[in-house]
Amino acid sequence: MALSLVPFLWVVLSFTIPLAGAQPEAFVQARKQMVRMQIQARGIHDQEVLEAMRTVPRHQFVPLDYLAEAYRDGPLPIGYGQTISQPYIVAYMTEQVRPKSDFKVLEIGTGSGYQAAVLAEIVDSVYTIEIVKALGQAARQRLRDLNYNNVRVKIADGYYGWAEAGPFDAIVVTAAANYIPPLLIEQLKDGGRMIIPVGSPFQVQMLKLIEKKQDKVRTKNLLPVRFVPFTRQDD
Ligand code: SAH
């Protein structure tokens, strides 16, 4: 039954994918269910975050081979050894930085552009950096096609942040670093929050929340997570 739907989806989607806004009802329903069962059920309650997760068409951010799994409760491969994060983790990280409509946010690790789009639904502007050129270019085009005009994508090593665009109200890092890059702390506004997974590649890492107040930096451990590694230009 589930398998027989797959060829049907392929046909429908080959017509609808280029049209932002025109989505098969099945995807809209899949998103509502994703939010109810994976996100609200685990304690995310910020209404704007929930609404953003109901709005962003996650199926447009995954490779066609994974279309049928776009709303599944887990990460998915996006090529180049990278992944789009689990929906719950995207919602959780977004909630933790307490996004507001006037915020300017920096993301490190654009990947598919999904986390950037979720942020862009809520905040004023998103600056996102991707180190893998092909992923950055594809995400830039995808975000443009979906009318996320408040997202800028830069292809660079995010270790250095984006000084010309900063300082930022919040920073979201979606690749696991061995330590917190100091320039990112520098580019955080006073009162700003940063969320980042810290730990060795391919082992369990700790998702940390950093709060900067009057130049004091407070760090709190949130959750054990598993992210792809934060790489450097010369790796
Ligand atoms: N936020 C993404 C998922 C990120 S996967 C999404 O919503 O789809 C982590 C991404 O971080 C990968 O695409 C990887 O190439 C990128 N990355 C790793 N190290 C980086 C660095 N130093 N600077 C910028 N991007 C980096």
Image: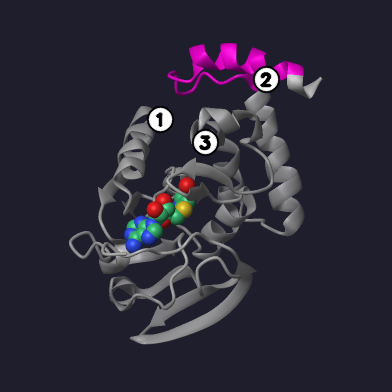
- Residue 213 position (above or below residue 8): below
Q: Is residue 41 left or right of residue 210?
A: right
Which of the marked residues, 1 or 3, is nearer the chain's N terminus?
A: 3
- State the residue at coordinates (63%, 17%): 9
Whether tag 3 and tag 2 are in contact, CB under 8 A, the answer is: no
- State the residue at coordinates (54%, 44%): 77
Residue 10 belongs to the span the image colors magenta: yes
Residue extending farthest to the front is 235
Q: How many angstroms separate mark 2 from mark 1 (CA)? A: 24 Å
- Residue 195 position (above or below residue 219): above
> Which residue position holds label 1?
146
Quarter of image, res 95: bottom right
Task: Name the chief secondary structure element in magenta.
Answer: helix
Amino acid at the residue labelled 1: Leu
> Which residue position holds label 2?
6
Residue 105 visible in the snapshot: no
SS at badge 1: loop
Q: Residues within 10 Å of mark 1 (few under 14, many from 20)?
A: some
